[in-house]
Amino acid sequence: MTATDARAPTPLAIVGLGKIARDQHVPAIAASAAFTLAATVDPAGGMAGVETFADLAAMLDGRPDIAAVALCTPPQVRFDLARAALLAGRDVLLEKPPGATVAELHALDRIAADTGRVLFTAWHSQYAPGVDAARDWLAGRRVTGIDVVWREDVRQFHPGQDWIFQPGGTGVHDPGINALSVLTRIVPSPLRVIAAEHMVPANRAAPIAARLTLATGDGAPVTMDLDFREQGTPRWDMTIRTDRGDLSLSRGGAVVSAEGLDIAAAGALPGEYRRLYDRFAALIARRERDVDATPFQLVADAFLLARWSVVEPFAW
């Protein structure tokens, strides 16, 4: 039994009880010895057996025993909620993307530092089964090129979620940032955006598809094909070419293959979120922050550099 396991579970509240919270956060908390789900906050209602609050202020006032919150709301409203929680003395996990702007995230990091609270940017794809092994395999190799295909059906993974196509919702970059979080975790040199093309439905404000060109710090080309219009099985794949062989990552990091490396996990998401909460518990135990703005900054840079084209309207 670890020191973390020996302590009483930390009471935690989920703020925003949408699809990702119900599908991933709730089961991961239930499986964790470090946390107990003490409350939910959502104006639309909660779940059986767990105290529910319509707004965060009521929860912060009514449950001073709740020491941590997981913010799973749309990113456009997350800054004020995270700020209130930090100033009320609670530790905060931010579901990705961590906010609506990069400046918001930096401001929250300063607040967390000033108040001595834990702030954790939860890039769940970095915790996929094969990611750490891929990083270790790439260490010491020179990357010569990267191709990423990250395509899924928005109707399957974000059903009826209009916020994702509104300003601050990032559109197809909401899943695309998962690929960037993996790349920034495993590639030995930093990435920068060179060019981008955004395809925006005529009736929406954020892209439904995007094509990005990036480069590593060594100048190796990186291409990204992002699309919310994929039918059937999603494609979360990347190929990384190096001076000593190629690495293939698929199913979001559940399957990784290269010379001397063969990982084929049954799935990624459930394990990712369990490991996220293990990491959050470790940060709380050590009173440390883990705020990584790099994937978010690359998305912001893509918006700055993008050429925009209008495509057919999108309806649910």
Image (cartoon, rainbow, N blue to C red):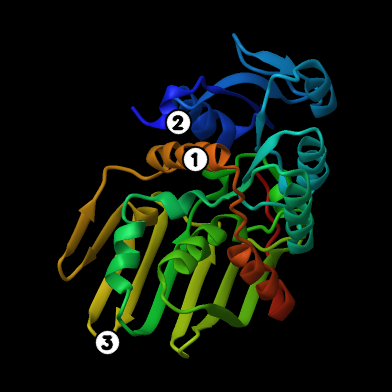
Three-letter amino acid code at the position of disc 1: Ala
Question: Which label sits in the foreground, 2 or 3?
Answer: 2
Nearest to the observer: residue 244 or residue 195: 244
**Dot 1 lies on which element?**
helix
Classify 58 as above or below 253: above
Q: Which residue is drawn at 80% across and 28% down?
A: 56
Give the labeled residue for mark 1: 282
The image quadrant that residue 72 belongs to is: top right
**Dot 3 lies on which element?**
loop
Give the labeled residue for mark 2: 4
On the rendered image, what quadrant is the N terminus found in? top left
Q: In this view, does 9 lie to the left or right of 294?
A: left
Give the labeled residue for mark 3: 243
Three-letter amino acid code at the position of disc 2: Thr
User: Which comes sooner in the sequence, label 3 or label 1?
Assistant: 3
Q: In this view, does 309 lie to the left or right of 228?
A: right
